[in-house]
Amino acid sequence: MSLRITLVTAARILRQLLNDRRTVALILAVPALILALISAIMDGSPQMFDRVGLILLAVFPFTIMFLLTSITMQRERAAGTLERLMTTPTAKLDLIGGYAIAFGLCAAVQTGVAATVAYLWLGLDTVGSAWLVALIAIVTSVFGMALGLLVSAFAATEFQAVQFMPVLIVPQIFLCGLIWPREEMAGWLQGVSDALPLTYSVEALQEVQTATEVTAAMLRDLGIIAGAAVVATVLGAATLRRRTG
Amino acid sequence: MPPDSPTVSVEHLVVERGHRTVLLDVSTSIPAGAVTGLLGPSGSGKTTLMRSIVGTQKVKSGTVTVLGEPAGSKPLRRRVAYVTQDASIYPDLSVKSNVSYFAALCGRSKEDAMAAIDAVGMHDHANQLAGNLSGGQKTRTSLACALVCEPEVLVLDEPTVGLDPVIREELWNHFHDLAAAGKTVLVSSHVMDEADRCDRLLLLREGRFIADDTPGDLRASTGTDNLESAFLHLIRELEKAG
């Protein structure tokens, strides 16, 4: 593994993204606009927006980094550039590291814009620091990136890559406590929810909602998401084969 | 390594793809300082052999050794470059960004990238997005991405398909310059009129070599005056022998 190659790869992925101005505009503007819409819908209940808006700050970058990575990596496999990279000094970890850095940065900027709008204009209020919210959102987005990487191995086309979103992402969003409190779900659904990593992002965010300091539960939750990201990355790395049939 | 020992040596290579055996016990060696042509119809196993040499092909049995190392092993990844049949470049990057990226992967500079872009005649298109280029321009960009690393072994899968005759001529001259500088160049083609440009020919048909000779000797031994007829002659001889 080489830090230089990892950074060169991250720069290449970012350059690809920046060449697509419309995608950049959508990545930056859409989450903030949707947050504004949600805040308008929940105008009569600011406490409700504090809960939902906060969770969405992590759900957006998670979902979008999943989509960006799964499609970019699917293209890389289909266009033969992956095979070509495998004949260069690029190690698998350089490539994955490059993706993590590029899309991690992208998620950071996206979260930055969305959080600024939410805190300054939409009246989002948390007891804990907005920086912690951003940290949780970025770690969650790296998990989304890792899932996207993994999924790209099973998608023969870009269409298929997109279709994996309802399979892997939507259940996590529905069960994480965003649309319905977890405590009120049936026992078996709570069990499923416990097994889904996004649940722990939401739990960590809810900690920031109520505690001024970093709590032990918050750290444990962050550890779980980071661990899930590592597991998904290792599985994804296993699908990057230097030799194919 | 002594100058005469082969750069690439393939021994009893067997490759299966799906349920089909694509290469059946193939052996050959490819020397440095020459342009070796790998000729044969589509589906004869040319790409599979090239992928085995660069180490991206799963092989069933046999060995492929490049520059004294097993094909595809880590030390070879700076010394061997592979240009696939379909240009493997990023359509959403400019020609310059594409070549600069592959240059950076092997520790070369932006100036080296520009020199490689000049060498393939893409200077005037350096800032264009690769996705907007014509097929031939994409191929040349892909070639520049390989040349920029100044590899000792260059494996090119049908690099001149669909190119303008003038550019084709320039590229073949470039391949011969590289060979003259001691590099190993392996070029595949399915068109026989390109075979005459090679120093040595390997004719592949249905996963087996049916000839390994210089173009001149091949014509002489088959009593034909062009390589297309020579190839046909060889196939008929083999069919007669059953």
Image (tube, grey):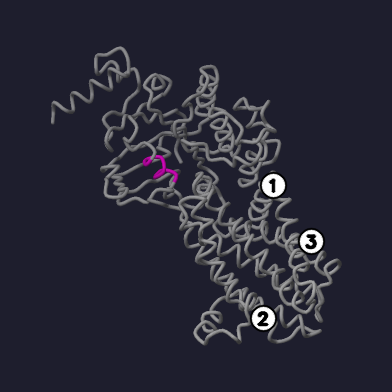
CA gap between label 3 and label 2 equals 22 Å
The residue pinned by badge 2 equals: A203
Is B22 magenta? The answer is no
Spot occupied by residue A24 in the image (x, y as percentages of width and height): 71, 51
Image spot of residue A19 (x, y percent): 69, 43
Callout 3 amino acid: Val
Q: Is residue A220 or residue A111 the one in the foreground?
A: A111
- Label 1 chain ID: A
Residue B70 rendering spot, x and y as whole percentages: 42, 50
Give the distance between the C-alpha atoms of the residues marked 1 and 3, in whole angstroms: 20 Å
- Looking at the picture, tell me which residue is in the foreground, B169 or B164: B164
Q: Which of marks 1 and 2 is nearer the N terminus?
A: 1
Look at the picture and state if B80 lies above or below A9: above
Q: What stretch is highlighted in magenta?
A: B48-54
Location of residue A126 with respect to B153 vertically, above or below: below
Residue with the mark numbered 1 = A15
A52 above or below A101? below
Most common SS among magenta residues = helix
Label 1 neighbourhood size at 10 Å, few (<14), some (14-19), many (20+)? some
Query: Is B50 covered by the magenta stretch?
Result: yes
